[in-house]
């Protein structure tokens, strides 16, 4: 698993019902309005609130104005990257919440 700011990244299989997207934004920042977006030769898919990316060549990366660019190498056949929110646990409130970027 990898992480860039408030986005977790892990390999998985692409669900058969996932639909192709035309944009490259993985997640928008709630605080700054900046976005985590993909560069390079990738295809983006979504299924509900789940986001997936298939890297087609070795030059793909996830970029964000406030974080270091992170390369995303191609995965083995049948695997894609899934992107989801990072959570933190508030011990005083005794609950988990999404990290805001």
Image: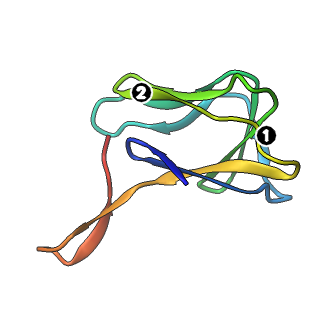
Considering depth in this image, is 77 or 96 the residue closer to the camera?
77
Gap between marks 2 and 1, in whole Å?
Answer: 27 Å
Q: What residue is drawn where x is 38% and y is 22%?
A: 65
Indicate left or right for 77 with 53 as reference: right
Q: Residue at x 59, y 55 (%)?
A: 49
What residue lies at 32% left-to-right and 40% top-to-bottom?
Answer: 101
**Foreground of the two, 70 or 90:** 70
Question: Where is residue 66, by image quadrant?
Answer: top left
Q: Is residue 101 visible?
A: yes
Spot occupied by residue 12 in the image (x, y as percentages of width and height): 72, 58
The residue wearing badge 1 is 20
Which label number is shown at residue 97? none
The residue at the far left in this view is 92
Depth check: 18 or 54 in front? 54
Residue farthest to the bottom, as pictured: 94
Residue at disc 2, secondary structure: strand
Label 1: state its secondary structure: strand
Residue at 29% from the left image edge and 30% from the top image edge:
32
Residue 29, x across and y down, in percent: 37, 36
Mark 2 burial class by Cα count in 10 Å: few <14, some 14-19, many 20+: few
Mark 2 sits on what residue?
68
């Amino acid at each position: 698993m990898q992480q860039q700011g408030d986005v977790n990244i892990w390999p998985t299989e692409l669900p058969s019902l996932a639909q192709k997207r035309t944009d490259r934004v993985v997640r928008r920042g709630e605080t700054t309005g900046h976005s985590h977006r993909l560069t390079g030769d990738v295809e983006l898919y979504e299924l509900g609130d789940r986001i997936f990316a298939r890297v087609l060549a070795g030059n793909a990366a996830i970029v964000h104005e406030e974080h270091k660019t992170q390369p995303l190498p191609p995965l083995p056949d049948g695997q894609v990257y899934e992107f989801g929110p990072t959570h933190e646990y508030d011990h005083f409130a005794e609950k988990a919440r999404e990290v805001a970027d």
